[in-house]
Image (cartoon, helix red, strand yellow):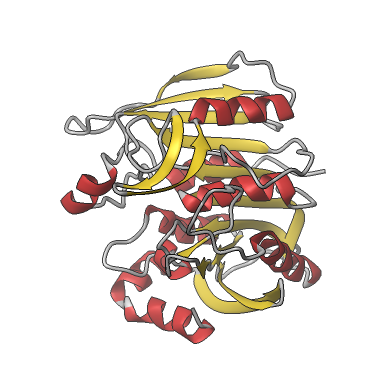
Amino acid sequence: MKLRTLARSCAAAGLLCAAAAEAASQHGAAVVAGGLQREYILVTPDSVPAGPRPLVLLLHGHLGTAANALGAGAVASPLSAWLDIADREHILVAALQGLKGADDHTGWHDCRLDAAEDTGADDVAFARAVIAGLVQSGRADPHRVYVMGMSNGAMMAYRLALELRPAPAAIAAVSGTMAGHSACDAEPVPVSVLLINGTDDPVVPYLGGRAGLRGHKTGTVIGADATRDFWLGVDGLANTPATGGSVPHRSADDPTRAIRLTWGPAHGPQVEAITIQNGGHVEPSLRYHYGWLYRQLVGVQNRDFESAEEAWAFFRDKTAP
């Protein structure tokens, strides 16, 4: 997707994009990584305090785009709540644009060796170049870099946690788990991790297995619990939750329930798992709700909390060495 196309796709959404963005500004940008020009959308608040700011990298899912993640489209993505967070908290958000893979759809080169649609691109180098440019310009704090991804973007977030150096201070992975047959062999370092997974996810199985929509399964993943346990081990945390319990339920017609368990101290390294009982392959959200057809494809959306707000609450006090 060309840079001008990214800008047009946001503008084409008209009031939808403007309503989501009111004060935060979106600007198309590009870097060269892995021999390719790679593009992203940078979100900045209108009022930015002096000095480097926290930076959140936002990774869309397979088939998605950076513009979709920031609200451009027929229905605004729950990830577009980051526009409000960026303005309120005076932080930078960079929505990265994936490339097309063998299936001619956009996505990420995550750690799955057996993902047929894999792009093969050096997406770690892409993320590194975006971070480096914003750090070198004095805009981003290198100790407060965070990553949030959905689905294939969540799988890519795990790859960045494993291979990006310096490592991000924390990541949030929604509806995605780690590779069953992994191409990633870097020695992991402690990273705080937030996992949000639905037990009835038809695309990325909660217990592990082959990922993908009906009739198009590709790439094997481990389960949500196994992914959690991996990071507990890396972070040196005992498998005994420090805190836990049900998230307050807000809607009588929502058949899902959210349960939060947290390991480790608030300032990290820390692992937090939010399990959505009966939940599907979709970001929980208070404000952005998908319709009937989407529910038939990916399952039920939890409406008890805003995923982006939960991620920022997890990120905000965590710093990397």
Quick one: quadrant of the C terminus? top right
Residue most extreme to the top: 240
Say if 45 sits above or below 298 in the image.
below
Report which quarter residue 300 is drawn in.
Answer: top left
Report which quarter residue 170 is drawn in.
Answer: top right
Say if 191 sits above or below 119 in the image.
above
Q: Which residue occupies the foreground of this view, 14 or 198?
A: 198
The residue drawn where x is 55% and y is 45% is: 312
The residue drawn where x is 44% and y is 67% is: 65
Question: In this rendering, would 153 be left or right of 19?
Answer: right
Could you tell me if residue 213 is visible in this image? yes
Q: Position of residue 115 (x, y in %)?
A: 51, 51
Question: In this rendering, would 295 be left or right of 80?
Answer: left
Q: Position of residue 28 (x, y in %)?
A: 55, 78
The residue drawn where x is 41% and y is 83% is: 8
The residue drawn where x is 31% and y is 78% is: 14
Could you tell me if residue 149 is visible in this image? no
